[in-house]
Amino acid sequence: MKASDVRDLTPDQLQDELLKLKKTQFNLRFQGASGQLEKVHQMRQVRRDIARIKTIQRQRSAEPASKS
């Protein structure tokens, strides 16, 4: 997921996507612990997508404060 794609989402869509990614991360962690994880790179990708969404949410929450 690219940052430009994330910026196009509404706050509700961002929250839904974040929740979905956290569930995916949880499942990947269990797969890794039990030795069933085949695509190891997925963990890194999901972790970065979560960080990307949180960063954009933080930026949006700071925008109104700086415009006043």
Image: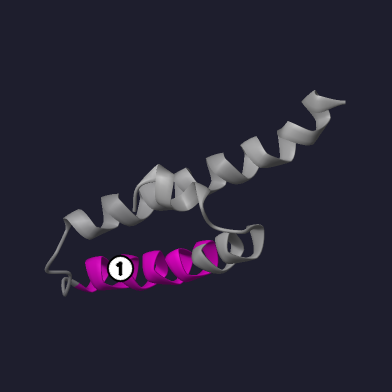
- Say whether residue 47 is magenta: no
Q: Residue at x 28, y 52 (%)?
A: 45
Residue 37 screen position, x and y as percent: 17, 69
Q: Residue at x 65, y 65 (%)?
A: 12
Q: Quadrant of the C terminus?
A: top right
Q: Give the residue type that dot 1 points to.
A: Leu
The residue that mark 1 highlights is 28
**Relative to the observer, which residue lies in front, 46 or 8?**
8
Q: Residue at x 47, y 70 (%)?
A: 20
Please state if 18 lies on the left or on the right of 3 as rendered.
Answer: right
- Give above or below for 19 relative to 63: below
Q: Which residues, given as a range, are shown in magenta?
A: 18-34
Which quarter of the picture shows residue 19? bottom right
Residue 47 screen position, x and y as percent: 37, 51
**Residue farthest left in this picture:** 38
Residue 55 screen position, x and y as percent: 54, 40
Determine the main secondary structure of the stretch shown in magenta: helix
Please state if 37 lies on the left or on the right of 25 as rendered.
Answer: left
Which quarter of the picture shows residue 67? top right
Q: Secondary structure at mark 1?
A: helix
**Relative to the observer, which residue lies in front, 32 or 4?**
4
- Give above or below for 3 relative to 31: above
Q: Residue at x 67, y 40 (%)?
A: 60
Please state if 38 lies on the left or on the right of 33 as rendered.
Answer: left
Marks counted in the figure total: 1
